Every structure is written in structure tokens, then in C-alpha cells.
């Protein structure tokens, strides 16, 4: 039987496979709602001399029916389950202090694509042999909640661009990547890791050939952080996280004392899925958890 219309509106998978925890149904619903359509996942098909020509070429409009999907040259998928259903290996290292956690973040960031390649474990998706062998592009597209304007496929707000005044950046600021992607900035503020060689300004790191790409930021978050004494390099990293909207929030966790709890930060942080995640300790003074760095790129299908 074919799936019936529901939360995901998938042509392939039913809503019954969504984890019953409220978080996951909310993610499916809110990603689709913010994006303005269901997710559109496309991966190149492996082709050899026996592969028949496809009726619908690369870049064709999203299919409206299962028959149209199966006629596509690309392997098409249309639900978060195709990405978040992949297995992986994610490892968190506890650092001695703040400085070491930042230095570790930058070192692991360089290893991210190498370890992804060495642990490649996704040569097949939706029962079709792929011309790629890692999960990354599948999962990045499966949670891509950017509006058409943010993706650069439509201009401005309104119906065409999908913008809204309540969204981060009004839903119209150009965002070049999905919220599940590679890192965008290095965060260590010492020159080539040498203690005492401070390089806490964004310009200084750019002169060293690091952080030389334009990175969208929430300007209000950046000002708040720098005025509170956070150095420019780390402030840029955190303000970059806040160009995204929260995807899930529990009713009883809306009104909190931000001096004592970090739920509002973690709500954004935990749905910015990058190759490496810098993890500050909880606000609670009695917590045994210190400064951490999570390495997230490795595959490993079961």
C-alpha cells in the first residue's frame, strides 16, 4: 500500500515510521512548514552501460506521483527519514578547559572529510545504487528547512520567497548551506595553536588564511556576545548558529531563567548539525560535564 498523506507527505514512507517521541514528529512538521514544501533529496544514480535512460532529467521539477519519481535520472527521496534514518558514529571529547576545546575543534574539523571518506558506508539509497558512497548529502537535504529565498532559488519574501517577519533573518537572508553541513568557521583564537599568541579578532585570523569566507551571522547576537566580552572569533561562530530558527521547543521550557539554564542556546545548538560541534558545559555549577568537542562526520551503517 502507498503511504497516505500526513506529516511528511512522502511518496515512499508512511508517518508510522517516525519515532513516537514528540521531538521527531515536530521536526518533520516544522522543517516542511518553514521550508514551504516537503524536503527534496536528490543523489546521483550510478550509471553503467546497462542503466536505461531516464525520462525525467537531472534538475527536473519535484515529482507529484510515485511514477514520476521512479522516472527521474537522480535518486529522489522526500522525507526526513531517509537522512535521519542513516547510522553514524559521533564521538565527544572532553577537554581540559575552554582553550583546549577550541583548539581541538579546529583540528577535528580538518579530519572531518577524511574520516567521512574512510568510513563511507552508504552506496545505496531507496534500493538504488548511488554514484556516491557517504550519507552526508542525503542527510543534509533531509533536514533542509531553508526558504526558497534563503536557498537562492527565489527573491525576497512573500509567497515566492517564503519569508516571514517572525523568522530569523525574515526568512530572506541568503544561507548557502543546510543546517546539517560542514563547519563554517574555525574557532581557536591562538596563532597556529601557540599559547600566548592571541589572535582573537576575525581580521587577524583572515590574514592567516583562516575564516576567509563570508559567513552569515545574526548581527544582534554578535553584538550581544562581543559587548559581554566574548572574543570576535567565538562570537562569530555562535552568531552564525543563530541565523537558524528553533525547530522544536517544549511548551514547559519556553519561560526560563537564562542565567541558570542553557536550554534556549542548546535548542539552536542541537539543531545545527555540523561536522564538528563545540559544546560548552551546562550552566549548573554542580555539573561534572566540562568543555567538550564532538566529532560528527563518521559513517557506519548497520
Image (tube, rainbow, N blue to C red):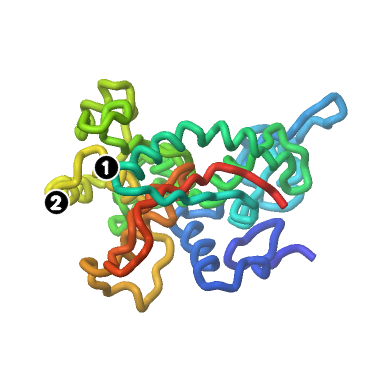
Residue 45: which disc?
none
Mark 2, Cα crowd under 10 Å, few <14 / some 14-19 / many 20+, is few
Kind of element beneath mark 2: loop
Is any atom of residue 135 visible in this view? yes
CB of mark 1 within 8 Å of CB of mark 2?
no
The reply, left or right, for residue 27 in relation to residue 171 is: right
Residue sitting at x 12%, y 48% = 227
Residue 148 lies, with reference to residue 288, above or below; the image says: above
Query: Which is nearer the eye, 82 or 35?
Result: 82
- As drawn, the residue found furthest toward the right would be 50
Expressed as whole percent of the image width and height from the top left, the position of residue 237 reads: 31, 42
Mark 1, Cα crowd under 10 Å, few <14 / some 14-19 / many 20+, is many
Residue sitting at x 71%, y 57% = 12
Expressed as whole percent of the image width and height from the top left, the position of residue 131 reads: 71, 32
Expressed as whole percent of the image width and height from the top left, the position of residue 75 reads: 70, 41
Query: Which is nearer the eye, 232 or 102?
Result: 102
Expressed as whole percent of the image width and height from the top left, the position of residue 290 reads: 35, 56
Residue sitting at x 41%, y 47% = 293
Residue 285 lies, with reference to residue 206, above or below; the image says: below
Is any atom of residue 157 visible in this view? no
The residue beneath circle 1 is: 234
- As drawn, the residue found furthest toward the left would be 227
Of callouts 1 and 2, the N-terminal one: 2
Looking at the rendered image, the quarter that the N terminus falls into is bottom right
The residue beneath circle 2 is: 228
Residue 72 lies, with reference to residue 207, above or below; the image says: below
Residue sitting at x 72%, y 36% = 130
Kind of element beneath mark 1: helix
Q: CA distance from mark 1 to mark 2?
A: 12 Å
Amino acid at each position: 500500500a502507498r503511504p497516505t498523506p500526513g506529516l511528511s507527505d512522502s511518496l515512499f514512507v508512511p508517518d508510522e515510521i517516525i519515532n513516537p517521541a514528540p521531538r521527531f514528529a515536530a521536526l518533520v512538521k516544522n522543517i516542511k512548514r518553514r521550508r514551504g514544501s516537503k524536503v527534496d533529496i536528490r543523489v546521483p544514480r550510478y550509471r553503467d552501460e546497462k542503466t536505461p535512460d531516464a525520462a525525467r532529467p537531472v534538475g527536473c521539477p519535484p515529482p507529484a506521483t510515485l511514477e514520476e519519481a521512479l522516472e527521474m535520472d537522480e535518486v529522489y527521496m522526500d522525507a526526513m527519514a531517509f537522512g535521519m534514518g542513516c547510522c553514524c558514529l559521533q564521538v565527544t571529547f572532553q577537554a581540559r578547559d575552554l582553550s583546549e576545546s577550541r583548539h581541538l575543534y579546529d583540528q577535528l574539523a580538518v579530519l572531518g572529510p577524511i574520516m567521512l571518506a574512510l568510513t563511507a558506508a552508504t552506496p545505496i539509497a531507496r534500493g538504488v545504487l548511488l554514484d556516491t558512497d557517504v550519507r552526508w548529502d542525503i542527510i543534509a537535504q533531509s533536514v533542509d528547512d531553508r526558504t526558497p529565498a534563503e536557498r537562492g532559488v527565489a527573491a525576497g519574501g512573500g509567497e515566492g520567497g517564503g519569508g516571514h517577519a517572525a523568522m530569523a533573518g525574515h526568512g530572506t537572508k541568503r544561507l548557502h548551506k543546510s543546517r546539517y553541513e560542514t563547519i563554517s568557521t574555525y574557532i581557536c583564537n591562538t596563532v597556529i595553536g601557540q599559547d600566548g599568541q592571541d589572535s582573537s579578532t576575525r581580521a587577524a585570523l583572515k590574514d592567516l588564511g583562516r575564516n576567509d569566507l563570508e559567513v552569515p551571522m545574526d548581527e544582534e547576537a554578535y553584538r550581544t556576545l562581543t559587548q559581554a566580552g566574548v572574543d570576535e572569533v567565538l562570537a562569530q561562530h555562535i552568531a552564525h548558529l543563530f541565523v537558524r530558527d528553533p525547530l522544536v521547543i517544549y511548551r514547559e521550557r519556553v519561560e526560563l531563567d537564562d542565567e541558570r539554564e542553557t536550554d534556549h542556546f542548546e535548542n539552536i545548538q542541537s539543531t545545527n548539525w555540523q561536522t564538528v560541534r563545540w559544546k560548552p558545559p551546562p550552566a549548573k555549577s554542580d555539573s561534572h560535564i566540562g568543555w567538550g568537542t564532538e566529532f560528527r562526520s563518521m559513517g557506519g551503517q548497520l
